[in-house]
Image (cartoon, rainbow, N blue to C red):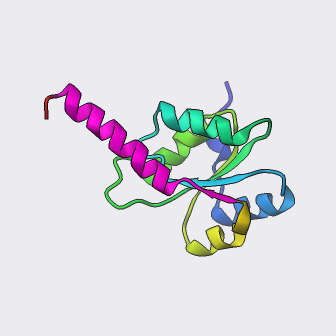
Amino acid sequence: MFDTRVKIVSSADLLAYAQAHPELPVVAGYFDPMWAPHAMRLKELAGASKLLVLVEPKANALLSDRARAELVASFGVVERVAVLTDDATREQVGARLIDERKSDEARYQTLAGHVRKRNNV
């Protein structure tokens, strides 16, 4: 069995890997909580390649940064994952960055609405 946590690297290492592999898309998002729409979106973004992923910090996240990174790393389309520690990394990735933060917020609201409805809240 492959321990996918080895895909989790520092922001600096992910940036260096991104520079060495300019063909790989870089995706930034919250992934909190990680659920099926995230998996489908990552697969869509990867296409025939792999992805580099930046897990963004989020105030009041349901899961820790590390837990979210471990979940993202478990996907086969993900080559490397880093927890974003500073805005400079995102800026250095530049135009290659696919920013999924707003979409992640929408996915969270959809899930929260579903949970409230199912629990009559």
Left or right: 58 with respect to 100? left
Left or right: 16 with respect to 75? right
* Residue at 56%, 63% in the rendered image: 84
Q: Quadrant of residue 49?
A: top right
* Residue at 84%, 55% in the rendered image: 21
Q: Give percent across and percent down for residue 76.
A: 68, 33
Q: Is residue 108 magenta?
A: yes
Q: Is residue 96 magenta?
A: no
Residue 73 vs 103, above or below: the answer is above
Q: Quadrant of residue 111?
A: top left
Left or right: 111 with respect to 80? left
Residue range (magenta): 97-119
Q: How many marks?
A: 0
| Closer-to-camera residue (8/53) | 53
Q: Give percent across and percent down for residue 44.
A: 66, 37
**Quarter that holds the N terminus:** top right
Q: Give percent across and percent down for residue 5.
A: 61, 41
| Closer-to-camera residue (87/44) | 44
* Principal secondary structure, stretch drawn in magenta: helix
Q: Give percent across and percent down for residue 67.
A: 46, 45
**Quarter that holds the C terminus:** top left
Left or right: 54 with respect to 92? left
* Residue at 46%, 49% in the rendered image: 104
